[in-house]
Image: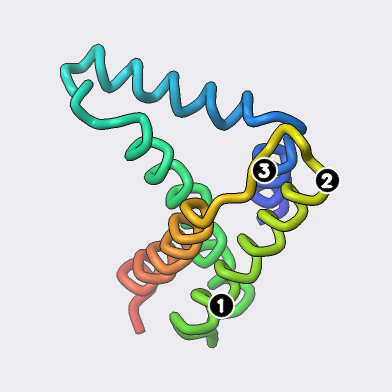
Amino acid sequence: MALYLMIVALIVFWPTADVASGSVAGIWSLLSAWGLGWISPTAVEFVTNVLLFVPLSFLGHTFLPHWRWQNWLLAGLAATILIELLQMIFLSGRSAQVFDLVANTLGALVGYWLVRRVAGP
């Protein structure tokens, strides 16, 4: 969990959007090479933002197994709001976006759904 949180912090608090943009461009180039160029870079960015937050609830379930989906929804939403506010206030090379808020929160819910499928009720 600590490693995951460090990686997320590195990605979201990098002073410019270069790391995130470069990742999206690289994934989109790979998809294009596989004949999937019809998938837009915007869709790739949305999915990578979802995937970024899946481990939050998936791994978090280890520490908070009693939490329900509503708790993880709020945790994902609160973490994203905090990240977007900090980016807006302190990182002039980054921009806060509602798009990220939706994708990251969805990622926390997907992680919860996955852990429930793996761990059971």
Query: What amino acid type is highlighted by mark number 3?
Result: Val
Which label number is shown at residue 12?
A: 3
Look at 73% across and 49% down and name the residue there.
Answer: 88
Please provide percent x and percent y for residue 25: 44, 21
Give the structural element (helix, strand or loop) at label 2: helix
What residue is shown with label 2? 90
Marks 1 and 3, how far apart at CA? 19 Å
Q: In which quarter of the image is the N terminus?
A: bottom right
Determine the image quadrant of residue 61. bottom right
* Residue sitting at x 42%, y 63%: 106
Could you give the CA–CA distance between mark 2 and mark 1, rounded to whole angstroms? 24 Å
Q: Is residue 114 above or below residue 74?
A: above
Which mark sits nearer the N-terminus, 1 or 3? 3
Viewer-proximal residue among 59 and 85: 85
Query: Element under label 1?
Result: helix
**CB within 8 Å, label 3 to label 2:** no
Circle nearer the N terminus (3, 2): 3
Question: Horizontally, is 118 left or right of 100 in the view?
Answer: left
Please state which of the two labelled residues, at mark 2 or mark 1, is closer to the viewer. 2
Q: Percent x, y for residue 51?
A: 44, 48
Disc 3: CA contacts within 10 A as few (<14), some (14-19) or many (>=20): some
Q: Which mark is residue 19?
A: none
N-terminal of the two: label 2 or label 1? 1
Q: Position of residue 119 (x, y in %)?
A: 38, 72
Q: Three-letter amino acid code at disc 1? A: Leu
Q: Is mark 3 on a helix, strand or loop?
A: helix
Characterize the local packing of mark 2: few (<14), some (14-19) or many (20 or more) Cα atoms within 10 angstroms: few
